[in-house]
Amino acid sequence: MNKRNKKSQMNILILFIMLMGPVLGCGKKSNPGPTPPPVTPVNTDPAQYGPPFSGVPATKDIVMYEVNLKTYSPIGINSAMARLDSIKALGINVVWLMPTYPIGILKASGSPYAVKDYMAVNADFGTLDDLRAYVAKAHTLGMAVILDWVANHTSWDNAWIQNKSWYQQDASGNIIIPPGTNYTDVAALNYNNTDMRSAMIKAMKYWIYTANVDGYRCDFADNIPNDFWVQALDTLNTIKTHKLIYLAEGTKGPEITAGFQMSYAFSYYSTLKSLFAGTSTPTSLFTTSSAEVASLPSPGIKLRYITNHDDASSDGSTITEYKGKQGALAAFVLAAYMDGVPLIYSSQEVGYPNAINFFTNVPVDYTANPDMVAEYKKIIAFRQAHEAVKTGTLTAYNDNDIVSFEKKTASDDVLVLVNSKNSSISYSVPAALQGTTWTNGFTKINTTFNTQVTLQPYQYLVLKR
């Protein structure tokens, strides 16, 4: 074979190899074996609905209004939304909605605190879109919205009941009602179960994202292990887009340490009620107030009230409890000014005259007693305008008949006198106040104290200098 033929054959071989290489390579790629699916990051939180509210007030500035949806006609979120402007006009900056969740039917009593589904809206009240619209309007008006959260128990037909270990059981393995209660319509949750805890926290996060709410009033908080509240509130606080409000229906100091900003003033309410009944004294009210404040770690604050949904049901109207419209207003001055932050309950501002059982529908005429509404506005407006009322040092001027105290900061000075009796009282002015001049916070009329001042039945004087 000559040199030219050898070279020609070599070129043909090289060309054959070059052509066959890609074919052989494609053959290998045609059967690569199973391909693992792409990894998708898991996000268990729903998408944020609406812009988070930037106007959540500081705790000391809160004036809260509790909304009972069953006092509106027709009942529901839309009827309540129509009154948001009126609520704002009172001076309110935080709205607390009583439970908006579907309630149980099995073993039911009609209580809104027997929650059947933590992540749904009660169809009797409206839809998720209705709740979103309510929250959005409140935000537009400059008010935060918190939901009522029921962590202690569920209804007997809640889907969670299928997970029996999520509930407390007796020695025979039967799910039980909450220990120490007669709540037969609900089943007690088991906080030793970590899966239940996780589901509870997930549901709490759901409403912050899905309805853009601003926190929770937590029902029966004292009956729930404090380490759960630490876990829950620490988790919610990872939502950095929201400033959240936490109110505990409880009295324990560790709840404040766990993250709640406010807890209930149960003792103050009881003493205030007995003061107007004539069975306690102004000194008792000061003692109770001081003890409550001292029981809380800083910066905890007490929620002060003259009624709420429980008390309006069991104790009746404020008109009954405090001996009439004027007495109810006088009591509210004490609740709003002595220390803590104030609450108004649906119907209170219009002087609804009867008890309200929150298990049932009780339509309230919200156009009644406009004179009371106007006075509530004055009381709240003065509070909001005076830092002394909110954070000032309290000096009590003890008297057998008149509740008299001064609240003072470096730049603000307020004096409050309240007659809790149904008779005129001649008040002996303390020596420290004799000769001092004050301006009435409502009438703007100046007053210079001598040795005596007369207060009419249930009259209150709110003074500044």
Image: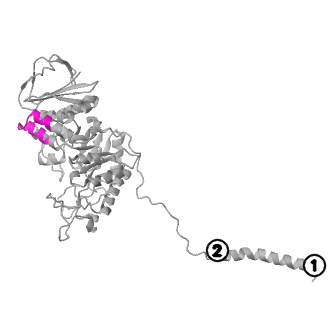
Tell me the amino acid under the disc marked 2: Lys
Where does the image place residue 2, in percent across and percent down from the top left? 94, 81
Quarter that holds the C terminus: top left
| Label 2 SS | helix
Q: In the image, what residue occupies the spot 13% across and 40% down?
A: 318
Where does the image place residue 363, in percent across and percent down from the top left? 19, 47
Where does the image place residue 305, in percent across and percent down from the top left? 19, 40
Quarter that holds the N terminus: bottom right
Residue position for label 1: 3
Q: Which of the 4 quarters of the picture holds residue 410?
A: top left
Up-down relation of residue 73 to residue 289 (above or below):
below
Up-down relation of residue 183 to residue 23 (above or below):
above
How many C-alpha atoms fall within 10 Å of the one at disc 2: few (<14), some, or many (≥20)?
few
Q: Which of the 4 quarters of the picture holds residue 308?
A: top left
Q: In the image, what residue occupies the spot 43% across and 58% down?
A: 43
Taking the magenta stretch, the answer to whether it contains residue 285 is yes
| Label 1 SS | helix
- Asked whether the viewer can see residue 77, the reply is yes
Q: Which of the 4 quarters of the picture holds residue 321?
A: top left
Residue 234's disc is none
Foreground residue, 254 or 260?
A: 254
Up-down relation of residue 397 to residue 362 (above or below):
above
Main SS class of the magenta portion in the image: helix
The range drawn in magenta is 269-287
Residue position for label 2: 29
